[in-house]
Amino acid sequence: MKSIKKHLLDGLRLTPVDADEKFSINDKGARIDGAPKKDELLDHTDALLERLTLLQDAFHADGRRALLLILQGRDASGKDGTIRTVCGAFNPTGVHVSSFGVPTATELHHDYLWRIHQVVPALGMIGVFNRSQYEDVLVVRARKLVPKNVWEKRYDHINAFEQTLTDCGVVVRKCFLHVSRDEQRERLQERLADPKKNWKFRIGDLDDRALWDEYSQAYCDVLTKCSTKNAPWFVVPSDSKSVRNYLITRMLVETLEGMDLKYPAMDADVADKAKGFK
Amino acid sequence: MKSIKKHLLDGLRLTPVDADEKFSINDKGARIDGAPKKDELLDHTDALLERLTLLQDAFHADGRRALLLILQGRDASGKDGTIRTVCGAFNPTGVHVSSFGVPTATELHHDYLWRIHQVVPALGMIGVFNRSQYEDVLVVRARKLVPKNVWEKRYDHINAFEQTLTDCGVVVRKCFLHVSRDEQRERLQERLADPKKNWKFRIGDLDDRALWDEYSQAYCDVLTKCSTKNAPWFVVPSDSKSVRNYLITRMLVETLEGMDLKYPAMDADVADKAKGFK
């Protein structure tokens, strides 16, 4: 495989949130000062995406691990765009995207991890969550849908759940797509004016913007309480789409490269039989 | 949207199998004499794939239909390659590939359509089946896994099942990827020599080649008994990968174009609220 070293821009990479450090969410963190120009980023990202396609083939063949990519972020933070661009590099056979909206009546009659567990990726597969179990400590908290004594227990549940997954071969990576308040306004306004996009809006989408600070606080707790060694959170500065795509693609490439992927050997009986094959 | 008319090569298109006509499967049908050169086909296919991406966005938004693409064919006929290349044009959020292998113990304790029904695509979604319910009248018949009086009832079951889907908004398109005996040998030999591919072989894969004629007869019955107006079968000459990809992409584009897709209007209350949006 060709080397990707030259496509790894110095310093431009995601690092896991350190739960022990003081942490806050503010607009400044949604940008990277002095990031390379868009064209340069696109070139590097394209090379990394090509690499990602090859790595996924090996990952699928290897079959000893599953990969779960969780994408969280406010409206218009770029979850859909990330899936289209970054996850578009994967062979469709090996990836399954799950989008978690408002729970159905049936889902509400189960614990909140029930619907999540059902779509955890199998070994060899990549699962992508567009929103996730974290909605139950984000929207649920910001909109006061359940009392504090209910949601505050959930960080422990989620950590325990993710530990189980990790112990069973699921590699978990979690990205918070961080947009600033100004950037969100601009994107929402563009969407509201675009007939190919504005049909998606629900009335509540605009209410959430009014709860900006409540969400910031809720995200802050998620990121610090649930960033673990095996299931780390990454804060992705997402005001620039090209920076966002570069960073997430690089993180995925590095994650897969760290797995020591191997194509399994052919079964001995098949190899034998193949000798006489016509 | 830009016109694709100039990318529709005269005469190079799939037509549904007509159940009333005499039909047989032979090596000649795996090729198209006088097909355009590979480069020309690739150019046209790329343009159609671009169009397919746009159409899927409208299809997903429209949300009144689901699309189910069934791919069947002998080993090495190109099912995986079709998914990688053609279905790679879809936004991963809107497509779900299901691969049907040997049934599990649990699946065998249910009727054979049970595992199929669970992954029928939802409205707005595209489902791709790599193998399908038809395995139960193909491999099961060719290898004599159940007696004739069991499998011969299944054509009616399957037609009734697909009729239900059709009546409920699922548009069904079925492709038999038709390769010749020589082309299959060549591809299997290449795979057996490729460490990135040969690990996938099971000993039975080679046995199936010895049952070539049994499979031809089984496919012949599937194609004539189960090609219906609403869930047609297409025979895709697949000795050439570029011909195969062109033909399937074109069929999908034409299927989606025939749906009168519309982006829904924005909810009136959202439109009202958006006026005061900051």
Image: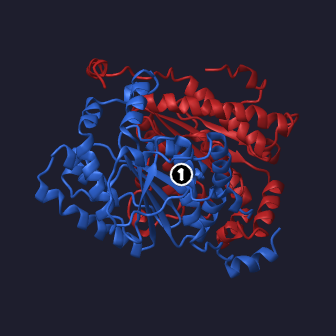
Chain colours: A red, B blue
Q: Residue at x 23, y 39 (%)?
A: B211
Side of A124 relative to A53 (left or right): left
Query: Of helix, strand and loop, which one carries label 1?
Result: loop
Query: Residue B187's x, y, as percent?
Result: 43, 31
Quarter holding residue A276? top left
Q: B230 and B89: which one is in front? A: B230
Residue at the image point whose x is 60% and y is 55% from the top: A138
- Residue A100: x and y in percent read 53, 57
Which quadrant of the view contains residue A197? Answer: bottom right
Tell me the residue that label 1 is attached to. Answer: A132
**Where does residue A174 sit, x and y in percent of width and height?**
59, 40
Q: Is residue A21 left or right of residue A63?
A: right
Q: Quadrant of residue A167?
A: top left
Asked whether B1 or A64 is in front, the reply is B1
- Count neighbours of disc 1 (C-alpha within 10 A) and say few if under 14, some if 14 to 19, many if 20 or more: many
Label 1 marks which chain's residue? A
Left or right? Give the position of B22 relative to B247: left
Determine if residue A183 is in view. Answer: yes
Q: Is residue A91 above or below residue B135?
A: above
Q: Position of residue A35 (x, y in %)?
A: 84, 34
* Image quadrant containing the C terminus of chain B: bottom right
Above or below: residue A55 compared with residue A85: above
Q: Can see residue A136?
A: no
The kind of residue tagged 1 is: Ser
- At x 65%, y 37%, the residue is A234
Query: Which quadrant, please, contains the N terminus of chain B?
Result: bottom right
The residue closer to the viewer here, A51 or A139, is A51
- Comparing B40 with B47, the one in front is B40
Residue depicted at 45% across the width and 41% down the height = B78
